[in-house]
């Protein structure tokens, strides 16, 4: 799910990295559908920019994809010789990707919508997000055992069952 700065589409990655070092928060408007139902197109989100080492499994992670800020769930992390890598996945997507730690910007802390706001730093989100992140991470672990890659093989019942359960849980609470 891509995000655009409210009223300013000229924010660049170097500026975001500087703001991250300063610990700023930013508000962006959402443009995609990969994080439905929790985040809808048109919702505004508040991102706490922070050191990527502070990100936790299940966080809705903001990262730079080369052209825009993207919001996906952090589901795994891996330490490599080149530094930290993060596995991210949109709740609505059948694919996941590994990104370099220096592209991670921070976590979504509030989702603003017309009906009110969802504070992801409070109950029940403080246990829902980590649980969803760990379940999706386990799913990918088992899928990678048989067929390493970044997309679920067609017809994988485990993958689709976990994705449907994730959607149901998010619809109940958002």
Image (spheres, helix red, strand yellow):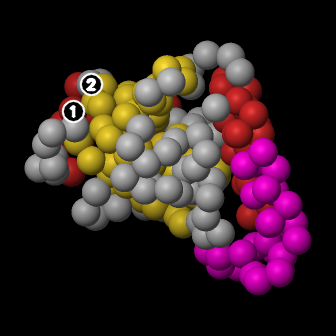
Q: Residues within 10 Å of mark 1 (few under 14, many from 20)?
A: some
Residue 118 vertical placement versus 18 (above, below) = above
Residue at 28% in and 30% down: 26
Can the viewer see residue 130?
no
Residue placed farthest to the front in the image? 115
Residue 79 vertical placement versus 129 (above, below) = below
Residue at 71% in and 21% down: 124
Residue 110 vertical placement versus 43 (above, below) = above
Q: Quadrant of the N terminus?
A: bottom left
The residue to which callout 2 is attached is: 24
- Secondary structure mostly seen in magenta is helix
The residue to which callout 1 is attached is: 19
Q: What residue span does the magenta drawing correspond to?
A: 142-168
Q: Is residue 113 left or right of residue 133?
A: left
Q: CA distance from mark 2 to mark 1?
A: 5 Å
Residue 172 vertical placement versus 70 (above, below) = above
């Amino acid at each position: 799910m891509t995000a655009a700065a409210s009223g300013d589409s000229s924010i660049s990655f170097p500026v975001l990295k500087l703001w991250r070092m300063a610990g700023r928060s930013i508000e962006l408007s959402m443009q995609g559908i990969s994080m439905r139902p929790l985040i809808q197109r048109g919702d505004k989100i508040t991102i706490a920019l922070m050191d990527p080492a502070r990100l936790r499994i299940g966080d809705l992670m903001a990262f730079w994809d080369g052209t825009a800020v993207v919001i996906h769930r952090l589901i795994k992390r891996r330490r490599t010789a080149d530094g930290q890598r993060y596995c991210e996945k949109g709740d609505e997507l059948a694919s996941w990707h590994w990104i370099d730690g220096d592209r991670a910007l921070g976590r979504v802390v509030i989702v603003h919508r017309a009906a009110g706001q969802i504070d992801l730093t409070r109950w029940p989100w403080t246990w829902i997000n980590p649980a969803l992140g760990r379940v999706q991470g386990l799913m990918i672990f088992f899928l990678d055992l048989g067929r390493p890659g970044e997309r679920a093989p067609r017809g994988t019942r485990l993958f689709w069952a976990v994705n449907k359960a994730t959607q149901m849980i998010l619809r109940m609470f958002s």
